[in-house]
Amino acid sequence: MTTRIDKATLMVLSNRALARAGLSPEHAETTSQVLVQGDMMGIPTHGVIRLTPYTERLKHGGVNPKAIPKIDQRAPSLCIVDGQNALGPVVANAALCQAIEMVKETGIAYVGCRSSNHLGAMVPYALQACQAGFVMLSGTSASTTMPPWGGAEARIGNNPMCFAAACPKEPHIILDMAMSVAARGKIRGAQAAGQAIPEGWAVDKTGKPTTDASEALEGFLVAVGGHKGSGLSMAIDVLSGVLSGAKFLTGITSWVGNNDTAQELGHFFILIDPARLIGKENYEAAMNEFCEIVHTTPAADPVTPVILPGEREQTRIADALAHGIELNVKVLEDVRRLAGEID
Amino acid sequence: MTTRIDKATLMVLSNRALARAGLSPEHAETTSQVLVQGDMMGIPTHGVIRLTPYTERLKHGGVNPKAIPKIDQRAPSLCIVDGQNALGPVVANAALCQAIEMVKETGIAYVGCRSSNHLGAMVPYALQACQAGFVMLSGTSASTTMPPWGGAEARIGNNPMCFAAACPKEPHIILDMAMSVAARGKIRGAQAAGQAIPEGWAVDKTGKPTTDASEALEGFLVAVGGHKGSGLSMAIDVLSGVLSGAKFLTGITSWVGNNDTAQELGHFFILIDPARLIGKENYEAAMNEFCEIVHTTPAADPVTPVILPGEREQTRIADALAHGIELNVKVLEDVRRLAGEID
């Protein structure tokens, strides 16, 4: 069952919940922006539902509420942000802001994050980069849940990657994808709801296909394209974990049942300034043409027009602003409880 | 039927074939290196078999044998190489060499290519970047052969992307992947051999699944992970085509039946210097640990140990150097003919 809540009210609740867990107003605001946008974009698995594990970890020492990320510029276009075990959105936002400053100098910038935590969905960061006019490549490591191609033990993460390209007219192109056929959060949701999962989402711990959510959570997610998804996951881990000096692969601690242990996740943001390459006008004309070519593709099913990556999420923002953010009733109750509004 | 030929002999034949099509010795050598390495790595679809279409295009004006790529540095870390319609390996090699120079300055560099052509396999370039100690992200656009997700007309290319990370001990990590479940070249090979293709590789021109190679070539390749592969293809096209000022999406001319028309393909190379980020020793230790974790994963099938992306291709190089390069007899005959050794 869902309800609707306006953005300002949800932001206040989220900020209060985070403040009660020890966060500064500034860090609470940054984190709430990311989570509330997740819900606005129709990504409830990465919305305010995360306030429960976030605040648990803040209270039990798995995340440090008082941490201030340290920025270490290593070269004209390279930087490492040491998150000091702050919440992921706090670290990632510091990194993205740093990347936006650096890209103006040399035209491209890489900022890696270490000692970080779950950063929410990637789309809010991508939207920020697009609104500033840039092209972005980013990703984050995650605890290991999948075997590498041909393996029978979880040694790679279902690492999300994101590509974004600013368009002169919204929607921007924003591809946010994890490497598995389905997200682990969706399997957790099915388990919580007592539902089966579709075939092809996961295998059990012995490597056999399963539609049982609990068996799947004890087993492994299945990677997109076999060796391709497996290799992409490693690529994102090198860019996020190795290059930033964070942990990687099995070095990352799972956050399940480890509320008092730092995960030491890594992320990365690469920004490119398209205006410095081909000029702002040429770039905008090209992106308009690009989007037009995609949008005018004859649809396989006429009822479902062809859309751009991330278009649906961006359309939902306008809907959420106009009609309120759709939220699971129980999730909202949890948020109110965390904010101290109810016992 | 295959035969074996030593590298030096094949290089001489390839260089002669290209010289007879008007290429300078330097450009012939660059191109032969890429194609011969393709065969050495066990990627015969991107080996000297390409000398036939390459020389056809050189002779009919689709590619300019005398072109010299123009290098235009746009910002401290950004550069565009205008290929002037030279052969793809000539343009891509100029871009990679430029990226290797630029990355030393600022720690990361983007080099885009425009007015280019088919560049062969990505792995030879990746190997060069790895041997210089860098992390590489690259890709190339291709003529449109797939519909975007939900579409029924080919408007995106099966654009290959590549990620490579230098390892202190070979093999380096080299992921070279196109967006489709299977490569179009493999379907062409099946058609030439009169064989059916496996289910799931392609759909016919009405969007229905097919195992007929000819029907598949009239229809569309199927993208990995549905909307994910479709979105990744667009990402590679923006990075290769839009940012370099090349053509993109349906603006690219197919090379099939168009030997006299420039394709205007785009490519890109992003190099990162890991030593500038975390120090050479830390990076090498991390990559050794990374590879060890992957290699020691229990295998689903004990007969097939878990390997790194690109490991098989790199192992084959040693085999080809020791025992000769395995080549299809007919392909070698074509090369000898192009080189003027036989009529």
Image (cartoon, coloured by chain):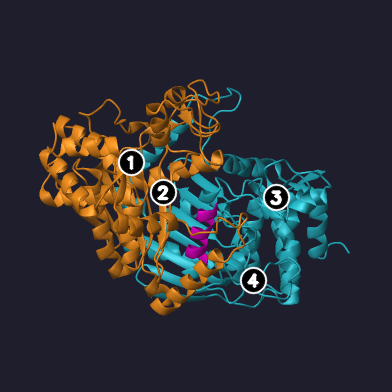
Chain colours: A cyan, B orange
Q: Nearer the viewer, residue A83 or B112?
A: B112
Does residue A184 appear left or right of residue B289 in this picture? right
Badge nearest the viewer, 3 or 4: 3
Image quadrant assignment for residue A121: bottom right
Tell me which residue sits at (34%, 68%) in the image: B133
**Are the residues under marks 1 and 3 on the same chain?**
no
Q: Percent from the top left, x then y, of residue B319?
A: 35, 57
| Mark before the other along the chain sequence, 3 or 4 | 3
Q: Are marks 3 and 4 in contact (CB under 8 Å)?
A: no
Residue corresponding to mark 3:
A203
Q: Which span is picked out in magenta?
A: A230-241
Please tell me which residue lies in front, A328 or B140. Answer: B140
Left or right: residue B203 versus residue B338 is right
Distance (Cα) linking label 3 and label 4? 25 Å
Q: Amino acid at mark 2?
A: Met
**Residue hosting label 4:** A263
Mark 3 nearby-residue class (10 Å; few <14, some 14–19, many ≥20): many
Q: Is residue B106 visible?
A: yes
How far separated are the C-alphas under marks 4 and 1?
52 Å
Residue closer to the observer: B239 or B171: B171
Which corner quadrant of the image does residue A290 belong to?
top left
Question: What is the number of the mark on residue B161?
Answer: 2
For this view, does A28 lie left or right of residue A79?
right
Q: Are marks 1 and 2 on the same chain?
A: yes
Given the image, on which type of amino acid does mark 3 rest? Answer: Val
Query: What is the distance, in whole Å, between disc 1 and disc 3 at their CAs?
Result: 40 Å
The image shows residue A152 at horizontal and vertical percentages of: 64, 58
Q: Is residue A238 magenta?
A: yes
Q: Secondary structure at mark 1?
A: strand
Q: Which of the image's four quarters has the C terminus of chain A?
A: bottom right
Q: Which mark is residue B138?
A: none
